[in-house]
Image (cartoon, rainbow, N blue to C red):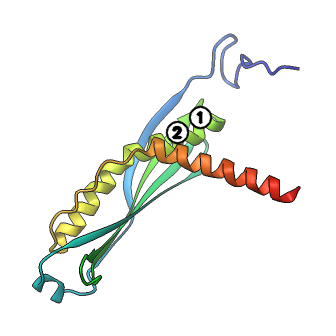
Amino acid sequence: MAEDNNTPQAGAAEGEKPQLKFSLQRIYVKDISFEAPNSPSVFKQAFKPKVNLDLNTTSQKVADDQYEVVVKVTAQVNDSETGTTSFLAEVEQAGLFRISGIEGAQLEQTLGAFCPNLLFPYARECVDNLVNRGGFPPLMLAPVNFEAMYAQRKQREAQQASQAAENTH
């Protein structure tokens, strides 16, 4: 039997589709860290940075229709010639979102791609500010396409699931 997608949700009037609601309620820094383990000697050499950047996103339901999404940015900068660590900056930029009327894969994509796209500019500014206050030249991170990252992650998960299924047979 086919599922009827027009079944009204609780509180929805007959014949109405559930109303989609999305709002960003709060943006905040959940965790922040800056280390310059080789200062002040690192300031005596020419700055030739090699940047290693790591991005992660997580989300969790915190209440009915309320989700916390976190974008974690870790930037480790080493001297490109000596390998000496110049600095390490970590920021966990979070947002509290109220989302209703979105479910399943669409909700997963909203939490894994759309919300991080909204949060990343704040994380980027925070990292830049930290680095600058640490006495280093600004670290202007390039924009990130979280939609593409989400699609790649889903593709990897599908491949891993496929390989796991093959290995069990």
Could you say which quadrant of the image residue 128 lies in? bottom left
Q: Amino acid at mark 1?
A: Gln
Q: Is residue 34 above or below residue 114?
A: below
- x and y percentages locating residue 39 in the rendered image: 20, 86
Q: Amino acid at mark 2?
A: Thr
Tell me, yes or no, if residue 89 can be seen here. yes
Most foreground residue, 11 or 38: 38
Marks 1 and 2, how far apart at CA: 6 Å
Q: Is residue 138 above or below residue 135?
A: above
Instruction: Give the class, few, some or many, for how many residues have Cα within 10 Å of label 2's Cα (few <14, many ≥20).
Output: some
Tags 1 and 2 in contact by the CB under 8 Å rule? yes
Q: How many marks?
A: 2
Circle 2 — which element?
Answer: helix
Most foreground residue, 89 or 12: 89
Tell me, yes or no, if residue 65 can be seen here. no
Q: Classify the position of the N terminus by image quarter.
A: top right
Residue pictured at 73% horizontal, 52% vertical = 161
- x and y percentages locating residue 2 in the rendered image: 83, 19
Q: Is residue 67 left or right of residue 134?
A: right
- x and y percentages locating residue 28 in the rendered image: 37, 55
Most foreground residue, 116 or 165: 165
